[in-house]
């Protein structure tokens, strides 16, 4: 979250705002001490150990931006400045978009065709 072991109130406020915004995208979002756990239970994951796509979003200062708070992926990729909650939510939701469970993709469409 931040460079210290105890996250600040401002970090939790930013994560809370992002969690509320991500709720619009029908993703599962849980806030915890390490950040936001975001997953898409309606999509196939990569392997048996990860049955659905997921990521841990953190919020911490970014030295390259004067120490301002930013959201980051679990692999350390910057997403957006923490003040840009809508932008961050769109980027995160976009990474989960288009992925649906295999069964849903093979279900017949309204005219009987497989999607």
Image (cartoon, helix red, strand yellow):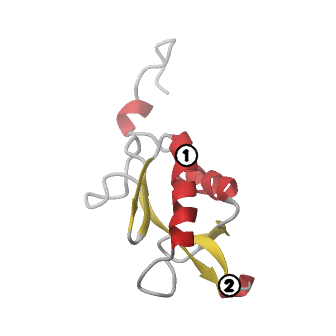
> Circle 2 sits in a helix, a strand or a loop, which is it?
loop
Residue farthest to the left, as pictured = 48
The residue under label 1 is 97
> Circle 1 sits in a helix, a strand or a loop, which is it?
loop
Q: Quadrant of residue 50?
A: bottom left
**Whether residue 98 can be seen here:** no
Report the front residue among 44 and 64.
64
The local crowd at label 1, few if under 14, some if 14 to 19, many if 20 or more residues have their Cα within 10 Å, is some
In the depicted structure, whether residue 89 falls above or below residue 33: above
In the depicted structure, whether residue 69 falls above or below residue 82: below
Among numbered discs 1 and 2, the one appearing first in the sequence: 2
The local crowd at label 2, few if under 14, some if 14 to 19, many if 20 or more residues have their Cα within 10 Å, is few
Report the front residue among 2 and 49.
2
The residue under label 2 is 67
In the depicted structure, whether residue 30 falls above or below residue 82: above
Residue 39 is situated, as x and y percent measured from the top left of the image, at: 41, 52
Residue 79 is situated, as x and y percent measured from the top left of the image, at: 63, 67
Q: Tell us which disc is closer to us: 1 or 2.
A: 2
Report the front residue among 82 and 42.
82
């Amino acid at each position: 979250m931040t460079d210290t072991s105890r996250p600040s109130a401002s970090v939790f406020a930013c994560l809370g705002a992002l969690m509320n915004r991500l709720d619009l995208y029908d993703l599962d979002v849980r806030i915890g001490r390490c950040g936001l756990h975001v997953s898409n239970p309606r999509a196939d994951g990569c392997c048996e150990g990860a049955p659905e796509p997921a990521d841990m979003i953190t919020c911490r200062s970014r030295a390259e931006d004067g120490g301002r708070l930013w959201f980051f992926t679990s692999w350390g990729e910057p997403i957006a400045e923490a003040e840009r909650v809508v932008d961050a939510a769109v980027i995160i939701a976009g990474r989960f978009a288009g992925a649906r469970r295999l069964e849903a993709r093979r279900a017949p469409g309204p005219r009987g065709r497989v999607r």
